[in-house]
Image (tube, coloured by chain):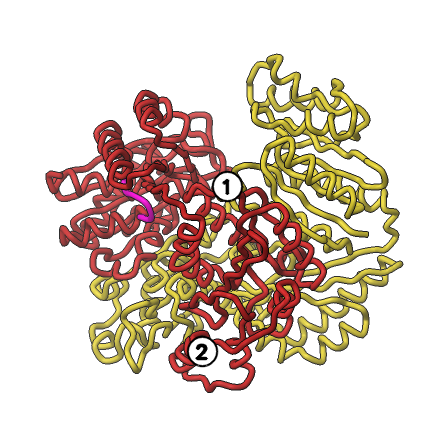
Chain colours: A yellow, B red
Amino acid sequence: MVSEIITIGDEILIGQVVDTNSAWMAEQLNLNGIIVRQIISVADTREDIISALGSANRNADLVLITGGLGPTKDDITKDVLCEYFNTGLVFNEEAFKNVERLFRYRNIEITDVNRQQAMVPEGSIVFGNLYGTAPGLWMKKGSTVFVFMPGIPYEMQAIMEDHVIPAIRQHLNIKTAVYHKTVLTQGTFEARLSAMIRDWEKEAGAKGIKLAYLPSPGFVRLRLSAYGEDMDKIRSDIDGMVKKLEKRIPQYIYGYDKDTLEEVTGEILKKSQMTVATAESCTGGSIAQLLTSVSGSSEYFKGSVVAYSNEIKENILKVTKESLEKYGAVSKHVVEEMAEGVRTLYDTDYAVSTSGIAGPSGGTEEKPVGTTWICVCSKNSIRSEKFLFGEHRGRNIRKTALTGLNMLRKLILEEAGK
Amino acid sequence: MVSEIITIGDEILIGQVVDTNSAWMAEQLNLNGIIVRQIISVADTREDIISALGSANRNADLVLITGGLGPTKDDITKDVLCEYFNTGLVFNEEAFKNVERLFRYRNIEITDVNRQQAMVPEGSIVFGNLYGTAPGLWMKKGSTVFVFMPGIPYEMQAIMEDHVIPAIRQHLNIKTAVYHKTVLTQGTFEARLSAMIRDWEKEAGAKGIKLAYLPSPGFVRLRLSAYGEDMDKIRSDIDGMVKKLEKRIPQYIYGYDKDTLEEVTGEILKKSQMTVATAESCTGGSIAQLLTSVSGSSEYFKGSVVAYSNEIKENILKVTKESLEKYGAVSKHVVEEMAEGVRTLYDTDYAVSTSGIAGPSGGTEEKPVGTTWICVCSKNSIRSEKFLFGEHRGRNIRKTALTGLNMLRKLILEEAGK
């Protein structure tokens, strides 16, 4: 069972857009045990599209194609499809109802051009598009299945999840059950995590569970995948191994699958009816920005003091001149006074503060670039920690912000007795 | 003159990483007048690499390949190259000196494995890699040129800019001069911009200048490209058209080429020795985060008050209860009091403030989601404006932050009499 991905669009070949659809589709296929042999991007021209389809027909059992389906005139794909599959366009009632639905919602009148969007190659199976006018199309040539989808990522993703993946599984008669769970960790890096859980990894491997480390600046995702005859069994295998992992490295796990640290932390604050404020130096507002990226965050986030200059640290956050002079702005004393300062000023239950040397300049021998103090505090506790991140300004800021959020999350859970 | 791009790596085919190298290389080729016929991603296997090279050899004059060159054992590309080009590996002194230089810098001892990294296929031209151990390789088969580069984006980009592009131009005997200038605009969108400058576009077209609109949330880049025999002529054509554009839409242009709004604004603040603070509600710290993403921003940025709750607006920024009750938090009165409040509190020359309904919830008939007030002020002026952005929370926040920065930039320039 071999598959290929084809993305169509001049904008890809002139480098105007990065093709993110391919990676997304490849991951979905991979998670269902289908191997992607190659990904190819071609121009919006008849010859290139036909040549790509022909080559895929010879080499693959399944071909996913995005792009070239839409209302603009340069999208010639549908005509090329008719030529390649030796068929003609027919009006599709269901696709037209979808166009009507979308236009009614947007309060736009339907014209003849829009009727065109409901024309599909005869013999194709039509998949509804929740968010756009161009439907997904399933066609066959010889033994190869071709699935055409629009190039707009969220349209394509919904069609894939709702229709294409189930249809592929049915068509290929995939009896194999597939189950995945992604464990999200913060506070360590890939190599150290891997060393810590080596024997757990072995045990998972013995159960036929595949592991993938997916690192990003500031966190590492660990994906567990299992394939088998019996969904209940593989699900319970994976859930069992996740439970063991939770006991093994509880200090690093903050969520699962599509969770984000800012959402998880926000949920905990909301449930416990607690509020938070931040006092940020080196992160320059990044923690506030993360927290407020979540809709509804006004329930628990009151605000922030970004204190980039020492003057603001002193005048607003009431950091003592003594601490600043004696220990410097990047120190345990100052970061703790910042956290206490903003918690008092903003009258919140919790506070997070940061002070560090983000770089690339400003480092000294004693405090090199990447040196960062982070503090979290509540009415009853204060906890601060020193980190040495790297040399890249943007990554240092990001790591500091995520680490601060995670320290906050842990302190709240601990104080709630969880 | 037809080119192809091949990216090698299992991680691309399982969807673990998005292939950003292709778009970057495609843009560089395109800017030099070289057409990219297709982009293909294949696995790290002998068969797939050889098949991709063979197909490219038949169809293209120039092939750029990234990935598969590096110290890890799964990178088999070099052996496959020797097989495909029917040659063997030889030790390259220059490449070895580069490995030595990098290792000395990182304080790591050189082992035999590292000597391996200086082995290159006999007959290849070697391009130095500033940031990594794997060199770029230029090889020929028949009339097709193959250029192999490491897959790490910044390593590849430096090799491309320093060596590959000049070598391609020389090899292909490209006499055509190429000149580009990108004009960066903020405060309008593609369709409106295009309508505003229609006759300017016509004039540029008549001079053989190509235009590309490159929109992102919050700003639109406009790229001018010209090709010709005489560099001085096309440069002066483009510079002349840019000057005309500057006169036509001065209110929207904030920079050129690789400038960012936060850097440009920072430069202006630095030069005029002025300071700034922000008071942020709906942007939640995003303006502060943008300003502090620039190294050296502590010279002009003092800090921020993120006032997400009305309580903080009142207690810290001294927004009046009356304004909050009478006009609501998203209003001209409140946003102006916020700006004045933070400017006084932080004792800065300038201040920016924001208050809006980022969504997706919180909208009303009178103030729908996307409604945003932004204010900038100095000692002598205060300016506020209402915007209606869209329905997407993240994009609303981003657009508000960029618009606020641009309003700040314009006010400073105006007060400096420029």
Q: Please check whether the numbered discs 1 and 2 fall on a single chain.
A: yes
Name above or below for residue B34 compared with residue A412: above
- Give the amino acid at mark 2: Glu
Q: Give the range drawn in magenta.
A: B254-259
Determine the secondary structure under disc 2. helix
- Residue at 69% x, 21% y is A118
Between B293 and A254, the one lying in front of the other is B293
> Residue B223's x, y, as percent?
36, 37
According to the image, label 1 marks what residue?
B35
Query: In the drawing, does residue A99 fall left or right of residue A34?
Result: left
- Give the amino acid at mark 1: Ile
- Residue at 79% x, 29% y is A124
**Residue B181 lies in what quarter of the image?**
top left
Between A58 and B143, the one lying in front of the other is B143
Query: In the drawing, does residue A257 fall left or right of residue B98?
Result: right
Badge 1: residue crowd in 10 Å (few <14, some 14–19, many ≥20) = some
